[in-house]
Image (spheres, rainbow, N blue to C red):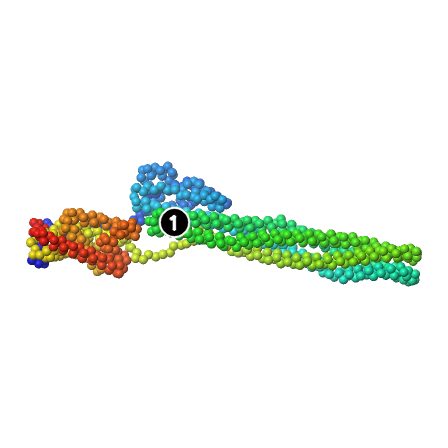
Amino acid sequence: MNGFRLLGMELSKLKAQKGVLFSLIGVLLIPIVYVAVLLSSTWGPYDYLNNLPVALVNNDEGATSGDDPINVGDDLVADLKKSNTLGWAFVSSEEAQKGLETQDYYMVIEIPKDFSQKVTTVLDANPQVPELKYIQNEGLNFMAAQVTRSATEKIREQLGNKITETYTRTLFSKFGEINTGFASGADGSQKIFEGTTSLSDGTSLLLKSLTDKSEDIQKLANGAQTAESGAGQLLSSIRGGTGDINKLAAGSKSLAQGVGELKTGSAQILGGLKAANEGSNGLTSGLESKLVPGSMQIQNGMIKVTETTKQLAAGSQGLTAGMKAFLAKHPELATDVEFMTLVGTSDAITKGLVQFDQEVQPLKAGAEQLAGGLTQAAAGSKQVSNGLSQLVAGQTAAAAGIDKLQAGANQVANGNASVASSWTKLNNGVSSLQSGLSQISTGNSTVATGWEAMTLGVTTLDNGAKQLQSGSKELSTGLAGGADEIAQIQVTDANIAMFSNPVGLSGETVNGLNYYRDSTAPYILSLALFVGILILSFVIDFKKPVVTPGSAFSWYASKLMNLSIFAIAQGLLVSLFALLFLQLQVDSVVTFVLFSVFTSLTFMAIVFFLVVVGGNVGRFVALAFLVLQLSTTGSNLPIPMLPENLQALSKFLPLTYSNAGFKSIISLGDTSFLLANVFVLFMFLVGFAILTLVAFLFFYKKGHAQVSVAV
């Protein structure tokens, strides 16, 4: 008797037994009911988070940042009151503790009283890290614990952004002080430039006067030497005549007048040198008392800015390292988008602080150069002041010599005037005149030498004044440029917000799920088809034939075709019900129906073998085999998130490939991925079908092909 005749007899017997037929119909409806219950809802697990009670205790007492009061706790409460992320309850510490004890709250979050105070210590020598405390009632529900923990991380991120904004505002406020310092330095250097311009003009005028009078001074020295020689000749030819004596008297009178003019010019030179000395002293005092200390303050301020930046960078790096260490201990957070975003944001802040430190270094170097330049300028100005003091002393000595010269000239004039009255006195006077002219010649030679040295010194002074003028102009321009560059740094609320949260998140979702049920549909469909076949084994006898078969193969073929009919019917009913009544969206309706039927046949081959070989034990093994696959085939957790031993085991479980196949049709739309999983399921189907055939051959040989009493 062939397999088709045996199949016909089994179907006829089923038709005759109404009770069994109704049982079969009920068995076919079980997977549909299962699918209907689990896939009919379209809500998601995150749709009603605002009903999840979470208590927030705000004990923050606030603090002051600069002149501005801050209260991070109040700001957070205000933001949370505007949101509906969770069912927030803003309560006291006592109410929160009582709510935990009575199982009313899934979590309690506490903001300590010194939270804002610790926020303001970022620029202190020993900054304190503010901590957000929470108590989680994980025993109430694991999923709720994950949601509340994620919400805590978001709150921590939100507070971190606010605190970073506070830090940034404090840091940028220092730029205003730096800008003011540069502006003050620019004003001071402009005054130096104006003073050095006046000094340069004065030294140029003094140099011109010295140069113009240099020839006259030389003539005076030469004339004094000639006068000395003439006095000798006069003494030898005193008796030359009255006319010569009168000429001598007139010449001595002119000499006295010239000495008076020399005295007047010397007094003018002395007054100019004293004025220049006073101006140089004022310049030196201004440099030493104002500009040099101001530049040192700028330098110290820049050093503090760089140290603060490095401290911020070190703290941010520590935070990033701590978060990465925490991630290493909790690898499950690698899929948590919020946590990974927080890690990325912290890392970006660290890089931003390091870059800011690098950009501040040129300002620090400029401040150091400014301080060094002003110190050198003060030293040079002091040297100029000392040189002018020496010039004043030398000119004072020259004035004294001119006074003596004037006195001598007057004596010569008086002596020559008395020549006419007294020849003897004239002889004595000529002797005195010769002596005085000798002194005049020596004094005038000294004056000429000193005049030349003074001219050289004033030339050097004039060159130094011009260099000082040029340097002060460059200093003024540089400070004004630095002030302009710092003033261009934007410190608006938008810039501060950008600095505190520099990275936005822009992305898209591919293969999106319309409903939460779409993510569980592959698992539910696979489970329903497997359970349906397993329950079918309690209604239909998978092993005993209705009549004694002619061969093991016909026996096996009749049972296989009989079960295949029900497996195909089950796959069609489940897939069509999901499509037509539950409105499940799939990439291809035909592919979905065919894969459902194919999966049902594959599960039938597996259960067929286990029941034929083991009977009730086989059914128990099938049930255990199904339970084994519930958490190891990508249903609850993705397979890559399982331990390595379970990942290896999942490769040998059929639900791994049925879940993946349904997923490729429902959400991925990936035909190549579907075909790969169909191939593996086909190997399961063929393998267990062959094993079942071997079992029938064995049982037929052992004489187990007995007629069943009931189907």
* Image spot of residue 583 (x, y percent): 23, 55
Closer to the camera, 29 or 439? 439
Q: Quadrant of residue 139?
A: top left
Question: Residue drawn 35% across and 47% down?
Answer: 329
Q: What residue is shown with label 1? A: 324
Closer to the camera, 116 or 660? 660
Question: Residue drawn 64% across and 52% down?
Answer: 379
* Image spot of residue 437 (x, y percent): 84, 57
Q: Amino acid at mark 1?
A: Lys
* Image spot of residue 240 (x, y percent): 92, 62
Relative to residue 110, is residue 541 depicted above or below? below
Closer to the camera, 134 or 611? 611
In the picture provided, is 497 more to the left or to the right than 374?
A: left
Q: Secondary structure at mark 1?
A: helix
In the picture provided, is 55 more to the left or to the right than 163?
A: left
In the picture provided, is 632 more to the left or to the right than 221?
A: left
In the picture provided, is 270 more to the left or to the right than 122?
A: right
Name the image quarter holding the N terminus. bottom left
* Image spot of residue 433 (x, y percent): 86, 56
The answer to whether residue 464 of the structure is visible from this angle is yes
Relative to residue 568, is residue 86 depicted above or below? above
Relative to residue 591, is residue 77 depicted above or below? above
Packing grade of label 1 (10 A; few <14, some 14-19, many >=20) is some
Question: Residue drawn 40% across and 54% down?
Answer: 504
